[in-house]
Amino acid sequence: MAKKILTVDDSISMRQMISFTLRESGYEVVEAIDGQDGIAKAEIQTFDLIFTDQNMPNIDGITLIQMLRNLPQHEKTPILMLTTEASDEMKKLGRAAGATGWLVKPFDPEKLLAVVKKVLG
Amino acid sequence: MSHPAKLDLSSTTKTFALLLETIHAELTTQIIATETELNQVKSLMDGAIDDLVDSFISLESTTRTGQNLIKQMAVSESDVADELNPFRNQQQKSKDLLREASRTLNELIVDAKQNHITSDSLLNVGKISDDTVKKILARLQHSSQSLFEKANEVASKVSAVMTENQSTLTLVTDEMASTTEQIARDVQTAVKSLQFQDMTTQLIAQSIDRLKIIRQMLNSFQVISNQSTSSLPMADLQATLINISNEIKRTGQARMKAFNVDAGHVELFD
């Protein structure tokens, strides 16, 4: 059965590109248009991996991670931050919130897939 | 005795206010024009990116479908070849049998001629005439020979067609596989490139936001400059300043950061 991945990003073309890259490699992808939509989907579904952007309207990526970690079904789900933010300060905040890893945009499709494979074991 | 010219404060203030008004009008016009142009660029880029993403995804999907179809055809062809194998074996056996029958008939005819077998001996068995037996034997020999030649001809044709088909199919399959791989690589490059374009449109959107704030600030200054100091509405002024401050703070938390050297960097935490 295909692994299910949630991708949260407020940019439609960015979501399309992440989804395209993952779907082409056989993963099932669910898209969320922002943090609020992301948490709503995560409350009713389980995922094997979650990608989230940082700077989004309504709920930002770090807050979303904190909220996800409070959901029993996503306490241990790998969460990867995919953002243009690259400062050590932000990474520390992300790590403290419970992020599994940090990827800086624009992503390289091959690298992204390699990380996904590694994280999903 | 002449007195030094009196400083006409009222006139100077009016001129200064007029100057401020002109600058304000000009700045506002320029900012609105820039906002409009940036909006147009953003809209054009958004459309172009969407179209490109759609076309790349569709192109990749189409070539993959084509490749899968050809793979299926190759499998079907191989299945047909497999199914034809027993037929070929059977055909070979039939050929052998016909060859044997032909040989036996020949021997029989030669033997009959050599031993002068008359119609009587055959008549005793089959109750038919000597001439009839000879005719039947000759016809049988001729038919078996024709059948043998025809079967051989058909087998050769089938074999040639199948060999040709398989070789063409192999060529097409190889070519299609190579094209699909090339397109997949191109799409990967496009995916990275399109992200830069997408981020550019987000930066444009942020610039438009900033221009809006500058315009708001200009409008606020105009309101203030139109008030006389004595009647300056402090509450309005305070509200305006808070609003400007909030807007500036909001743009500080921009959705997009400018491109940096860390692009593509990956870090997994322990």
Image (tube, coloured by chain):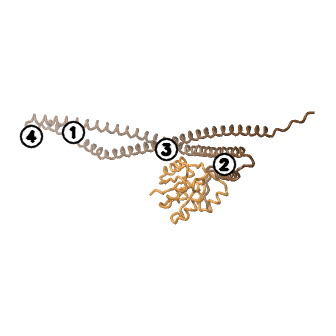
Image-quadrant location for residue B32: top right
- The residue carrying mark 2 is B261
Image location (x, y in percent) of residue A39: 52, 59
For the residues marked 3 and 4, what is the alpha-carbon distance in whole angstroms?
A: 82 Å
Instruction: Report in which chain the residue with disc 2 lies.
Output: B
Q: Which tag, 3 or 1, sits closer to the chain's start?
A: 3
Going by the image, does B94 lie left or right of A87?
A: left
Query: Mark 4 to mark 1: distance in Å?
Result: 20 Å
Q: Is residue B248 visible?
A: no
N-term mark: 2 or 1 = 1
Q: Residues within 10 Å of mark 1 (few under 14, many from 20)?
A: some
Q: Mark 2 and mark 1 in contact? Answer it, CB < 8 Å.
A: no
Amino acid at pointer 4? Leu
Same chain? Circles 4 and 1: yes
Give B161 or B189, whichever is nearer the viewer: B189
Q: Which residue bears the numbered disc 4?
A: B122
Q: Note whether residue B124 is visible.
A: yes
For chain A, give the colour: orange
Tags 3 and 4 both on a single chain:
yes
CB within 8 Å, label 4 to label 1: no
Rendered hue of chain B is brown
Pointer 1 chain: B
Secondary-structure class at tag 1: helix
Label located before the other in sequence (2 or 4): 4
* N-term-proximal mark, 3 vs 2: 3
Task: Mark 2 vs mark 1: give the one in front.
Answer: 2
